[in-house]
Amino acid sequence: MLAGLIVNAHSRVHRRAGRGIGVRSLADPLPINTGDEGMGRIAFLLLALFAEMERTFTAERAAQARAVAEASNRHIGRPIAHPADKIEYAQLLRGQGSSLGVIAAKTGIPKSSLHRYLARQPAAG
């Protein structure tokens, strides 16, 4: 995958160079200009390589952190917005056949959240 991204970056720069368009870095301490032959293009490709490596390493570190959190039974992701007792009450009301509107009014939980919390529990009929 990494090689494909670098080749893609190189081909984009090469196509634009044919039309007289170059890429020039304004923020880097090294003068990088793909309009110049040779070193400018090599420097650009090296920066693209380093950026892709950092992206890969970041994804690997995040996956490792998720695995460690899951192994220690910690919640991963966004915290639950509503207390467990309200969710249980909503489930009880749903089990008794209450509509989402009634449940939302009694618990204060928006309908959009109730859809997620009650998705696995069918309404009693």
Image: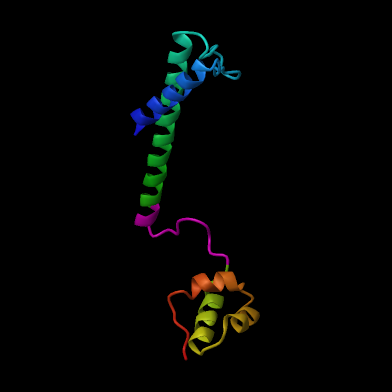
Q: Position of residue 22 (x, y in %)?
A: 54, 17
- Image side of residue 2 versus residue 121, left or right: left
The colour scheme used here is rainbow
Magenta stretch bounds: 69-81
Residue at 34% x, 28% y is: 3
- Image side of residue 74 versus residue 21, left or right: left
Residue at 62% x, 84% y is: 102
Q: Nearer the viewer, residue 77 or 40?
A: 40
Residue at 51% x, 20% y is: 16
**Displayed quadrant of residue 49:** top left
**Displayed quadrant of residue 101:** bottom right
Q: Is residue 39 magenta?
A: no
**Displayed quadrant of residue 23:** top right
Q: Position of residue 39 (x, y in %)?
A: 45, 9
Q: Is residue 77 magenta?
A: yes
- Image side of residue 124 versus residue 111, left or right: left
Q: Position of residue 106 (x, y in %)?
A: 63, 82
15 up-or-down from 67: above or below: above
Q: Position of residue 115 (x, y in %)?
A: 52, 73
Q: Nearer the viewer, residue 71 or 115?
A: 115
- How many numbered marks does the figure carry? 0
Q: Nearer the viewer, residue 39 or 62?
A: 39
Main secondary structure of the magenta stretch: loop
For the N terminus, the quadrant is top left
Residue at 43% x, 38% y is: 58
